[in-house]
Image (cartoon, rainbow, N blue to C red):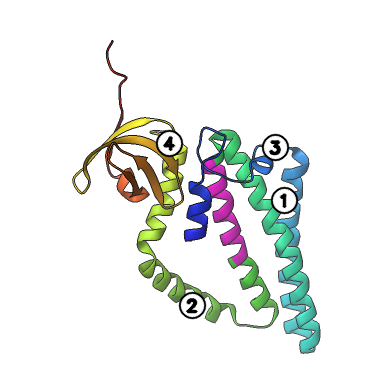
């Protein structure tokens, strides 16, 4: 997570201030790309269902199940990559490249989990037990990483709503932070970096989202 935050905190030549694979996300969203992503996702789902049903009905040897699982993994990697890239481009087109980068990362994470569930299903692991285990794991992870998840969600909201952008001079009013006035240096996955008259401050995104934010007016002539 820290690596992602440092990557996204790096200033880019674009106004969003979020470094990402700009060549990919700023490329035109074509019908071919959308069709490829949807087709790959559909094929992946059908492959998992067919492989699971075939294995359970015909009691295939474990070696064949592992071959099917590897096929699901390989195709799943392509499906997740294409789907995440398409969603990232779609959000970039409608909002900005920062929001597109966050959506792409989240899509990759969700897709990876779906592929793992599919592989375990093909190998004969009970879906009921798998879902129960996933539910318990999600609760534990949610509690343990509550603040980090809150910051990531807040980053997405800030990048889409855009109450400020990199390069703005803003005034932040918050009960916890007091009053901060500074120059926005970067908007990352977990922090907003402000340069004040005294130092450089990294404010959690969730705190920024809960604060009153105003853009500083230029001095009167």
Magenta stretch in the rendered image: 98-112
Q: Which residue is under mark 3?
A: 27
Q: Please name whichever residue, 208 or 179, is drawn nearer the observer in this view of the structure.
A: 179
Mark 2 and mark 1 in contact (Cβ < 8 Å)? no
- Helix, strand or loop at disc 1? helix
Left or right of 114? Residue 152 is left
Dominant SS of magenta comes to: helix
| First along the sequence among labels 1 and 2 | 1
Q: Position of residue 97 (x, y in %)?
A: 56, 39
Report, in whole angstroms, how far the alpha carbon at label 3 lies from the one at label 1. Answer: 15 Å
Q: Reply yes or no: does residue 120 show up in magenta.
A: no
Mark before the other along the chain sequence, 3 or 1: 3
Mark 2, residues whose alpha carbon is within 10 Å: few (<14), some, or many (≥20)? few
C-alpha distance separating marks 1 and 2: 29 Å
Disc 4 is placed on an element classified as helix
Could you say which disc has been placed on residue 37 in the image?
A: 1
- Separation (CA) of disc 2 from disc 3: 40 Å
Tell me the residue that label 4 is attached to.
161
Q: Residues within 10 Å of mark 4 (few under 14, many from 20)?
A: few
* Position above or below: 201 against 173: below
């Amino acid at each position: 997570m820290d690596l992602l935050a440092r990557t996204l905190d790096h200033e880019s030549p674009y106004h969003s201030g979020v470094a990402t694979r700009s060549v990919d996300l700023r490329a035109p969203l074509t019908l071919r790309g959308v069709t490829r992503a949807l087709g790959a996702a559909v094929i992946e789902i059908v492959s998992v269902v067919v492989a699971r049903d075939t294995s359970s009905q015909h009691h295939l040897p474990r070696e064949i199940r592992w071959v099917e699982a590897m096929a699901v993994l390989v195709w799943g990697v392509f499906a997740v990559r294409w789907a995440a890239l398409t969603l990232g481009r779609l959000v970039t087109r409608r909002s900005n490249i920062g929001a597109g980068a966050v959506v792409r990362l989240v899509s990759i994470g969700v897709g990876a989990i779906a592929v793992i569930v599919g592989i375990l299903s093909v190998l004969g692991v009970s879906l009921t037990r798998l879902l129960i285990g996933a539910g318990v794991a999600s609760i534990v992870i949610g509690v343990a990483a509550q603040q980090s998840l809150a910051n990531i969600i807040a980053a997405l909201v800030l990048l889409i709503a855009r109450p400020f952008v990199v390069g703005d001079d803003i005034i932040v009013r918050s009960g916890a932070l007091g009053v901060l006035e500074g120059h926005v240096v970067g908007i990352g996955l977990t922090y907003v970096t402000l340069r004040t008259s005294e130092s450089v401050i990294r404010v959690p995104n969730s705190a920024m989202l809960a604060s009153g934010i105003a853009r500083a007016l230029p001095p009167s002539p």
